[in-house]
Image (cartoon, helix red, strand yellow):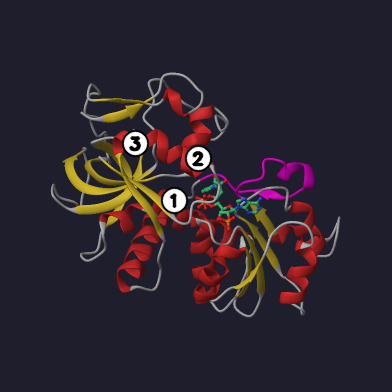
C-alpha cells in the first residue's frame, strides 16, 4: 500500500513515500480503515525528530500520523456496532499517513461532515477537553488561553465559550479577528503579555491553558497570584517541557478510550451541526507529507493541514 515511512530520526528529509508497505491487520477490538484524509499535527514532526519518545516510543520503520477520517475496511475479532463501509474518524496505532491504517478508537462520521473536517477533530478535540477538565475551569470563570488561534487552542476557545467561560486568548494580530469571531478577547503574545491580559480581564484570571509553549509559564504563574500560589494547580501546558521546573502540570497522555470515543462522537456531531469548527489551512497529497510537516513546524499555520492518500 501507499504510505510515508521513516527509518531514522531527523529532519523532513527522512520521510520517504513508498507503495511497498504491508496492509496492517486489525487485532481484537480494532478496525482497519481505508484512509480518506489525515490530520497533520506538530507531534508528527516532534516524533520524527525523536523528541517525544517518552510519550510515543518509535519502532522503525515508522509511519507518522495519529488522526484520520476514512471508511471501515476490515474488522478485528470482537468488534461490534461497526460494519465494513461505515464512515468514521479516529485515532490510529499504525500511522495515518497511509492508504490503510488500524484504529482502536473510532466514532461515526456524520453525513455532511467533510473528510477534511472530520480528520481535523480527534487530536484537537481530545486535547482541548482533557486540559479544560484538568484545570477545572467552569461557567462564570475567566480563562487565559495561550496560543488560542492554533488548532488545539481554537477548539479550546470554542468549548470554553460554549460552557459560559470568558476566554482571553493570545495570538498574533493577524488572528485577532478570528478569535473575536469565536467569542474570545484577543491579546498579542510577547513582551508585556501579563499587562495586556490584566487589561482584558480586569477582574482577574482563574485558570490558564498553555497551548503554545514559548516560555509563557512564568506569566501564567504571575497572572494566578505568583510563585507558591495555591492556584498553580489551575495551570496546565501541552507544549512546554519545562513545566515540571515550575511545578505545573504537563498534560500529554490521551485519556481513557471510552471517554475519548464519547468525546469524539460529540465533537463530530457538533462539527456537523456547525457549532464546532477547525479552520482548514490547506489540503495536500500524501506525497507532500514532508512539505506539510515543514509548514507545521513553521509554527504559524492558520488552521489544520490535511493530507489526502
Ligand atoms: N501534550 C498534548 O497532548 C498535545 C496535543 C496536541 C498538541 N500539542 C502541542 O500543542 C502545540 C499546539 O498544537 P496545534 O496543533 O494547536 O499547533 P498549531 O495549530 O500549529 O498552533 C500553534 C500556535 O502557536 C502560536 N505561536 C507561534 N509562535 C508563538 C509564540 N512565540 N508565542 C505564542 N504563541 C505562538 C501560533 O499563533 P499565531 O499563528 O497566532 O502566531 C499558532 O496558533 C504544539 O506544540 C503541539 O505539539 C500537545
**Label 2 vs label 1, nearer the camera:** 2
* Helix, strand or loop for disc 3: helix
Q: CA distance from mark 1 to mark 3?
A: 21 Å
Q: CA distance from mark 2 to mark 3?
A: 17 Å
* Disc marking residue 255: none
Residue carrying label 3: 288
Q: Position of residue 56 (x, y in %)?
A: 50, 33
Q: Position of residue 229 (x, y in %)?
A: 84, 60
Look at 23% across and 36% down and name the residue there. Answer: 99
Residue carrying label 2: 43
Tell me if residue 81 can be seen: no
Look at 75% across and 69% down and name the residue there. Answer: 196
Which one is nearer the viewer's eye here, 169 or 90? 169
Q: Is residue 249 magenta?
A: yes
Horizontal arrangement in the rendering, residue 98 relative to residue 277 (left or right): left
Q: Earlier in the sequence, mark 1 or mark 3?
A: 1
* Helix, strand or loop for disc 2: helix
Residue carrying label 1: 123
Q: Main secondary structure of the magenta part?
A: loop
Where are the magenta residues, as a range? 238-253
**Label 2 vs label 3, nearer the camera:** 3
Amino acid at each position: 500500500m501507499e504510505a510515508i515511512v521513516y527509518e531514522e530520526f531527523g529532519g523532513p528529509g527522512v520521510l520517504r513515500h513508498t507503495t511497498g508497505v504491508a496492509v496492517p491487520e486489525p487485532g481484537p477490538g480494532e478496525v482497519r480503515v481505508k484512509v480518506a484524509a489525515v490530520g497533520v499535527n506538530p507531534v508528527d514532526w516532534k516524533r520524527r525528530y525523536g523528541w517525544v519518545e517518552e510519550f510515543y516510543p518509535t519502532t522503525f520503520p515508522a509511519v507518522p500520523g495519529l488522526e484520520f477520517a476514512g471508511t471501515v475496511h476490515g474488522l478485528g475479532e470482537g468488534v461490534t456496532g461497526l460494519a465494513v463501509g461505515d464512515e468514521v474518524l479516529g485515532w490510529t496505532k499504525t500511522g495515518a499517513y497511509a492508504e490503510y491504517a488500524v484504529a482502536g478508537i473510532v466514532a461515526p462520521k456524520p453525513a455532511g461532515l467533510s473528510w477534511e473536517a472530520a480528520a481535523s477533530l480527534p487530536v484537537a478535540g481530545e486535547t482541548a477537553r482533557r486540559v479544560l477538565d484538568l484545570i477545572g475551569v467552569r461557567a462564570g470563570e475567566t480563562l487565559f488561553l495561550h496560543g488560542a488561534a492554533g488548532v488545539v487552542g481554537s477548539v479550546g476557545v470554542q468549548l470554553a465559550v460554549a460552557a459560559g467561560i470568558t476566554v482571553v486568548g493570545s495570538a498574533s494580530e493577524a488572528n485577532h479577528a478570528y478569535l473575536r469571531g469565536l467569542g474570545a478577547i484577543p491579546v498579542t503574545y510577547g513582551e508585556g503579555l501579563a499587562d495586556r491580559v490584566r487589561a482584558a480581564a480586569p477582574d482577574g484570571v482563574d485558570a490558564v491553558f498553555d497551548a503554545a509553549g514559548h516560555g509563557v509559564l512564568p506569566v501564567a504563574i504571575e497572572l494566578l497570584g505568583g510563585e507558591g500560589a495555591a492556584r498553580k494547580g489551575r495551570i496546565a501546558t501541552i507544549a512546554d517541557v519545562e513545566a515540571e521546573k515550575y511545578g505545573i502540570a504537563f498534560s500529554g497522555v490521551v485519556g481513557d478510550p471510552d471517554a475519548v470515543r464519547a468525546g469524539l462522537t460529540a465533537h463530530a456531531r457538533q462539527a456537523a451541526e456547525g457549532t464546532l469548527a477547525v479552520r482548514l489551512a490547506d489540503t495536500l497529497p500524501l506525497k507532500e507529507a514532508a512539505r506539510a510537516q515543514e509548514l507545521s513546524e513553521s509554527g504559524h499555520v492558520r488552521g489544520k493541514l490535511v493530507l489526502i492518500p
